[in-house]
C-alpha cells in the first residue's frame, strides 16, 4: 500500500510540474454548438461541462474522468470537449464499447454538424469497407476553411 501511495505522489508531483496545452476557442462558435443540444442541461451536467472546459483552458495537464449512469449526458460533455479541441486544431477520437453505441454517437455527431461546418467519418463496423480509411476533419475556423489531419482506421 505504501509503495502505491508513493508512486501516486510521485506521479502527481511530476504531472503538476509539467506544462499542459491551454485550449483557446471562440465563445460564439461554442455557444452555437451548445445550442444544438436538444435537451435541457441538468445541474450536474452543467457543472461537469464547466469543469471540463476549465480544465481544457488551463495550462495544466488535464486529469478528469466523467462517469455516470446511462442517459445522464456524458456524451454531451464529451462532444463539447471534442468541439473545443477540434476548434483548436487537435484531432479527436471518440471510442465506444459496442458497435451500436458507436453508430449512435456517429449519428449524433453528424446531426450536430448538419450546419455544413464539418462531416465526421467513422471507423465502425457499419461503415462500408471502402470508407474505413477516412480523412478526419477539423472544424474550420474563421481563418481557415480547409480540411486537415489525416489518419487511418
Image (cartoon, rainbow, N blue to C red):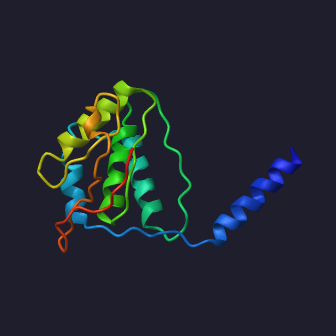
Front-lying residue, 147 or 101: 147
Q: Is residue 15 above or below residue 49?
A: below
Q: Viewed as shown, does residue 101 lie left or right of 60? A: left
Name, please, the residue furthest toward the left.
Answer: 115
Q: Quadrant of residue 28?
A: bottom left
Q: Position of residue 12 (x, y in %)?
A: 69, 60
Q: Residue at x 56, y 73 (%)?
A: 19
Q: Residue at x 77, y 61 (%)?
A: 10
* Rendered position, 33 above or below 143: above
Count of labels in the image = 0
In the displayed orientation, state which residue is furthest to the right. 2
Determine the residue positioned at 43% across, 39% down: 95
- Residue 17 vs residue 68, the one in the foreground: 17
Residue 74 point in image, percent of width and height: 40, 38
Quadrant placement of the N terminus? top right
Residue furthest out toward the front: 130
In the rendered image, residue 85, in percent from the top left (x then y), is placed at: 36, 60
Residue 150 vertical position relative to residue 24 in the rendered view, above or below: above
Q: Quadrant of the C terminus?
A: top left
Residue 125: image quadrant is: top left
- Which quadrant would residue 14 be assigned to in this image? bottom right
Q: Position of residue 106 (x, y in %)?
A: 28, 37
Q: Nearer the viewer, residue 4 or 124?
A: 124
Amino acid at each position: 500500500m505504501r509503495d502505491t501511495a508513493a508512486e501516486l505522489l510521485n506521479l502527481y508531483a511530476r504531472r503538476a510540474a509539467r506544462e499542459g496545452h491551454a485550449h483557446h476557442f471562440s465563445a460564439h462558435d461554442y455557444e452555437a454548438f451548445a445550442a444544438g443540444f436538444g435537451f435541457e442541461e441538468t445541474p450536474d451536467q452543467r457543472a461537469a461541462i464547466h469543469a471540463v472546459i476549465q480544465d481544457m483552458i488551463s495550462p495544466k495537464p488535464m486529469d478528469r474522468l466523467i462517469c455516470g449512469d446511462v442517459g445522464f449526458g456524458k456524451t454531451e460533455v464529451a462532444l463539447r470537449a471534442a468541439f473545443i479541441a477540434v476548434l483548436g486544431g487537435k484531432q479527436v477520437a471518440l471510442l465506444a464499447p459496442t458497435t451500436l453505441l458507436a453508430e449512435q454517437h456517429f449519428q449524433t455527431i453528424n446531426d450536430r454538424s448538419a450546419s455544413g461546418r464539418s462531416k465526421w467519418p467513422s471507423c465502425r463496423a457499419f461503415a462500408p469497407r471502402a470508407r474505413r480509411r477516412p480523412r478526419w476533419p477539423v472544424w474550420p475556423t474563421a481563418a481557415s476553411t480547409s480540411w486537415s489531419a489525416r489518419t487511418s482506421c
